[in-house]
Image (cartoon, grey):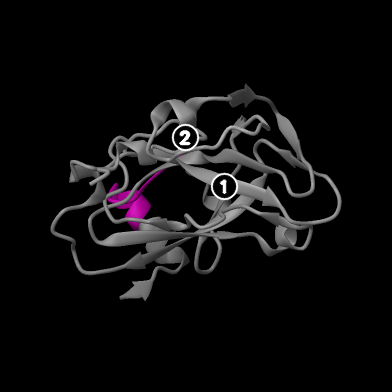
Amino acid sequence: MSILVDHEIRSEVRSGRLVIEPFDDTLIQPNSIDVRLADRFSWHEAGSDVIDPYKSESVLEGLVHIVDDSIVIQPKEFVLGATLERLCLPDDIVGQLTGKSSLARLGVMVHVTAGFIDAGFSNPPAQITLEIVNVGNRPVRLHAGMSIAQMVFTRTARCEVPYNLKPSAKYNGQPAAAHSRYYLNSTG
């Protein structure tokens, strides 16, 4: 297993095994590629109703979706965003989304816990949902199109069942800023 370096990322994209749409060669870093922020955001309105991850109506209640060229994230505020880029990984490459240190220094985290992208994600290519939170003390404006995170790719052994072939793959082909689909899990 090894992390792909710049020329390996380019080679995988050229071969069509690794799909990044739109692809911008200037975003390639020595060991990653920058991904940009899309213009779609969603969040739950504030309220006192408890969200039960097993109940779809609970998860879907109070969801707000917007399309805008920028958004201001207030301190302690949480929103879902998405990468502008859509990805499709082969069955022997995994992705790891990591925040940009320049934004982290402003208090912006771009993935609360969901930074790992399974081999075989996603066919058709899909955007990566970002769990964005401002842990800083001041509001921060984020702009659609700005570099928001880095995607690191690691070559692995081929998996038997890539993500896009799993019957339980809830986020295959997901739209931008996809909400939780935990309620599709079995409860027992």
In percent of width and height, residue 85 lies at 49, 41
Mark 2 secondary-structure assignment: loop
Contact, mark 1 vs mark 2 (Cβ under 8 Å): no
137 vs 160, left or right, is: right
- Do we see residue 125 in this rendering? no
- Disc 1: which residue: 131
**In the rendered image, which residue does mark 2 sit on?**
178
| Region of the chain picked out in magenta, as a range | 12-21
* 63 left or right, relative to 78: left
Dot 2 surroundings within 10 Å: few (below 14), some, or many (20 or more)? some
Q: In the rendered structure, which amino acid carries the disc numbered 2?
A: Ala
**Residue, far bottom:** 1
Q: CA distance from mark 1 to mark 2?
A: 10 Å
Q: Position of residue 106 (x, y in %)?
A: 79, 57
Depicted 29 relative to depicted 16: above or below: below
Q: Closer to the camera, 127 or 109?
A: 109
Image position, residue 115 (x, y; %): 48, 57
In primary-sequence order, the first of circles 1 and 2 is: 1
* Image quadrant where one finds the N terminus: bottom left
Q: Residue at x 79, y 48 (%)?
A: 75
Asked whether 69 or 179 is in front, the reply is 179
Q: As displayed, is residue 161 above or below residue 167?
A: below
Q: Residue at x 50, y 68 (%)?
A: 31
Q: Is residue 84 magenta?
A: no
> Which residue is at the front of the view, 48 or 82?
48
